[in-house]
Amino acid sequence: MRRHAESVGLAIEDEVPPALLADGIEPDTLGLFSGPSLRDPDAGWSDEAPLITLFLGPLRDYAGPDPAAFAEEVRRTYLHELGHYLGLEESDMPSRDLD
């Protein structure tokens, strides 16, 4: 997993930016994967690099005031988005405890 994670950029935002909201991303989104996945047959030809973005405001709201719960939710959200890079679909996440 670490080798794959090193191939994906990481961005941290306080909130979901207006441009993403305009594209239909919900304001309470915890994280977002963008770019080609490993299963994308055109990944080698894409100009877009794979990127995981974590949204701290929604993560704080979801986790509540407990710092340990926040840290755990950041970890789970990161792994969830990394799963998308690996080619997993939303339906694959519950069986991996990443829903």
Image: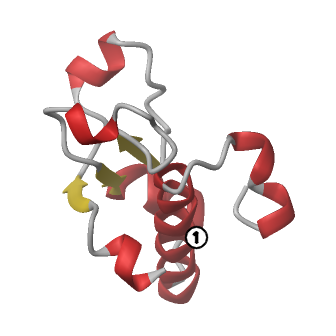
Label 1 SS: helix
Q: Position of residue 52 (x, y in %)?
A: 33, 53
Height in image: 32 above or below 70?
A: above
Which residue occupies 46% across, 52% down? Answer: 85
Q: Residue furthest bottom?
A: 68
Q: Residue furthest left?
A: 47
Which residue occupies 24% across, 51% down? Answer: 14
The residue identified by callout 1 is 76
Q: Position of residue 17 (x, y in %)?
A: 23, 31
Residue type indicated by callout 1? Arg
Which residue occupies 50% across, 76% down? Answer: 75
- Judge whether residue 54 can be spotted in this image: yes
- Judge whether residue 35 can be spotted in this image: no
Height in image: 34 above or below 38?
A: above
Q: Position of residue 29 (x, y in %)?
A: 48, 40
Along the horizontal axis of the image, is 60 left or right of 20? right
